[in-house]
Amino acid sequence: MDGADASRRLLRRLASEEPLDLARAALAVAREEYPELDEGKYLRVLDQLAEGVQSGVPAGATVERRVGRINAHLFHELGFAGNQGDYYDPRNSFLNDVLDRRLGIPLTLSIVWMEVGRRCGLRVDGVGFPGHFLCKVRLDEGDLVVDPFHRGQLLGVDGLKKLLSSAVGDKVKFDPRLLQPARSREILVRMLQNLRAIYQQRDDIPRALSAVDRVLLLAPDDARALRERAQLYERLGGSAAAAADLDKVLQLEPGAPDAEALRARVLRLRGTSQFLN
């Protein structure tokens, strides 16, 4: 996969920068499927979206008015929307496709909203709310929580509780700490995990593996991702690589509840690898 190699190279370079440039990194993820992707073109699209917002508000407009103008421009004038008809289409996770098609999932629509908001002078963060990504605009006193998937709906506590219940049921109780800002790196990991899950559901194991490889470029000590990659390596016959990933999991989590089972699995994988060699 030439596109995946290009995506890895660019993500590796961006991952060394702090803070990580969210828009450029999201476009780097898309480069797996679009090796010739023109990064500059889509950054200019984001600039143009912000210009469209700013042209409709007077200088010195309040934060609330600018938020309303962003929602009006993106969702009503331009037609950005949540893709409820085909939620698990991989294109919903590629920023270039979202900007071209004006369809996305909560995460990618939030990235568009955040990038436009920041260009309009707002202090805006992503929020990794359970089951449904959101944006949070910081005010001098308090915050505004925005749901770009539902056309920029503003959510108070009651709305957040309802959203939480619909997303994950009663397993998680609402707590204001669920609205902590997500770092750019965490947002990219979540995007790649979404893609991994979609590809794995479609039994496209090479693409699922590529997504997890890139998660581990951003978060090398992510034990969950290492476990997932080991499983994918096994499915592709890579016993030695799977054993190496599980070894690292044991180093990171020596007291894991399944540590003994992992050690037995590593021994079995190494035996399989020697047999194959």
Image (cartoon, helix red, strand yellow):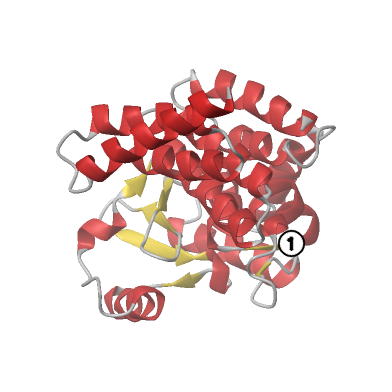
5, 228: nearer the viewer: 228
Residue 3 % position (x, y): 76, 32
Residue 264 % position (x, y): 29, 39
Q: Quadrant of residue 42?
A: top right
Q: Residue furthest left?
A: 255
Residue, disc 1: 102
Q: What residue appears at the point 23 percent right and 70 percent down from the top-left corner? A: 174
Element under disc 1: loop
Q: Quadrant of residue 177?
A: bottom left
* Image quarter of the N terminus: top right
* Image quarter of the C terminus: top right
Determine whether, in the image, residue 277 is placed left or right of residue 6: left
Q: Residues within 10 Å of mark 1 (few under 14, many from 20)?
A: many
In the displayed structure, 170 sits above or below 248; it is below
Residue 162 % position (x, y): 34, 81
Q: What residue appears at the point 51 percent right and 60 percent down from the top-left corner? A: 67
Q: What residue appears at the point 68 percent right and 52 percent down from the top-left corner? A: 204
156, 69: nearer the viewer: 156
In the displayed structure, 240 sits above or below 128; it is above
Determine whether, in the image, residue 162 is placed left or right of residue 2: left
Q: Is residue 60 visible?
A: yes
Determine whether, in the image, residue 60 is placed left or right of residue 155: right
Q: Quadrant of residue 251?
A: top left
Q: Is residue 222 visible?
A: no
In the displayed structure, 258 sits above or below 144; it is above
**Residue type at the position of mark 1:** Arg
184, 209: nearer the viewer: 209
Residue 238 % position (x, y): 56, 33
Q: What residue appears at the point 35 percent right and 40 percent down from the top-left corner? A: 265
Determine whether, in the image, residue 260 is placed left or right of residue 241: left
